[in-house]
C-alpha cells in the first residue's frame, strides 16, 4: 500500500495511492484516495477526493467533496460542494451544492440547498438553487451569440 502524509511543505508532484496533505502547496497531486486540508494545488486527479479549506485550479475524479474551498474546474462522476465556490462544475452523475456558488453547473442531477449559479444545464433539480440561465436560456443565448459572431464575420470579409 503506497501511502503519503505531507504537512507544511511546498511540492511539485505527489503520486500515491493514499495521499493526505495539510497546510501545503502542491503543483500536482495524483492518487486513489486524496485528502487535502488547507492546501493550494494546481491540479488534483484521483478516484476519491476530499478537500477542506483548500484551493485548486483543476480537480478531476470519480467522487469529489469540497468543503469551504475554491476550485476553478471541478469534473467528477459525483461531486459535493459545501459552502464552496467552483467556476465550472461538471458531473456525469449527480452534483450536490449546499450554500455554494458555481458559475456553470452541468450535471445529470443536481441537489441543492441555498446555492447559486449563472448557467445551469441539468436533467433534474432537487432543492433551492437560484440561477440566471437554465438550459433553455443557455441554448438561446448561445444561438444569439453565434448568430452575432457569424454576422460580424460576414461583414468583415467584405
Image (spheres, rainbow, N blue to C red):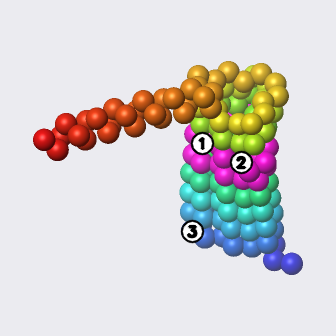
- Answer whether residue 125 is visible to the viewer in this image: yes
The residue positioned 59% from the left and 22% from the top of the image is: 132
- Residue indicated by mark 3: 12
- Left or right, residue 27 beside residue 16: left
- The one nearer the camera, 68 or 64, is 64
Mark 2 surroundings within 10 Å by alpha-carbon count, few (fewer than 14), some (14 through 19), many (20 or more): many
> Picture quarter containing residue 148?
top left
Mark 3 surroundings within 10 Å by alpha-carbon count, few (fewer than 14), some (14 through 19), many (20 or more): few
The magenta segment is 72-94
- Left or right, residue 157 beside residue 100: left
The residue positioned 59% from the left and 54% from the top of the image is: 58
The residue positioned 59% from the left and 48% from the top of the image is: 73
- Answer whether residue 4 is visible to the viewer in this image: no
Element marked by disc 2: strand
- The one nearer the camera, 122 or 53, is 122
Q: Position of residue 101 (x, y in %)?
A: 65, 31
Distance from disc 3 to disc 2, alpha carbons, whole Å, reads: 28 Å
Mark 1 surroundings within 10 Å by alpha-carbon count, few (fewer than 14), some (14 through 19), many (20 or more): some
* Viewer-side label of 2, 1: 2
Residue 88 badge: 1
Is residue 80 on the magenta stretch? Answer: yes
Q: Is residue 100 above or below residue 109?
A: above
Residue 124 badge: none
The residue positioned 40% from the left and 37% from the top of the image is: 146
Amino acid at each position: 500500500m503506497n501511502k503519503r502524509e505531507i504537512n507544511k511543505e511546498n511540492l511539485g508532484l505527489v503520486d500515491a495511492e493514499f495521499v493526505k496533505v495539510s497546510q501545503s502547496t502542491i503543483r500536482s497531486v495524483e492518487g486513489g484516495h486524496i485528502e487535502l486540508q488547507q492546501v493550494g494545488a494546481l491540479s488534483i486527479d484521483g478516484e476519491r477526493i476530499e478537500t477542506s479549506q483548500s484551493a485548486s485550479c483543476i480537480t478531476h475524479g470519480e467522487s469529489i467533496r469540497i468543503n469551504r474551498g475554491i476550485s476553478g474546474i471541478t469534473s467528477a462522476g459525483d461531486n459535493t460542494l459545501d459552502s464552496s465556490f467552483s467556476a465550472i462544475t461538471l458531473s456525469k452523475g449527480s452534483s450536490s451544492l449546499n450554500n455554494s456558488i458555481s458559475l456553470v453547473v452541468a450535471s445529470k442531477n443536481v441537489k441543492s440547498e441555498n446555492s447559486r449559479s449563472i448557467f445551469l444545464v441539468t436533467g433534474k433539480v432537487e432543492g433551492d438553487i437560484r440561477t440566471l440561465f437554465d438550459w433553455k436560456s443557455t441554448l438561446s443565448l448561445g444561438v444569439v451569440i453565434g448568430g452575432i459572431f457569424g454576422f460580424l464575420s460576414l461583414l468583415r470579409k467584405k
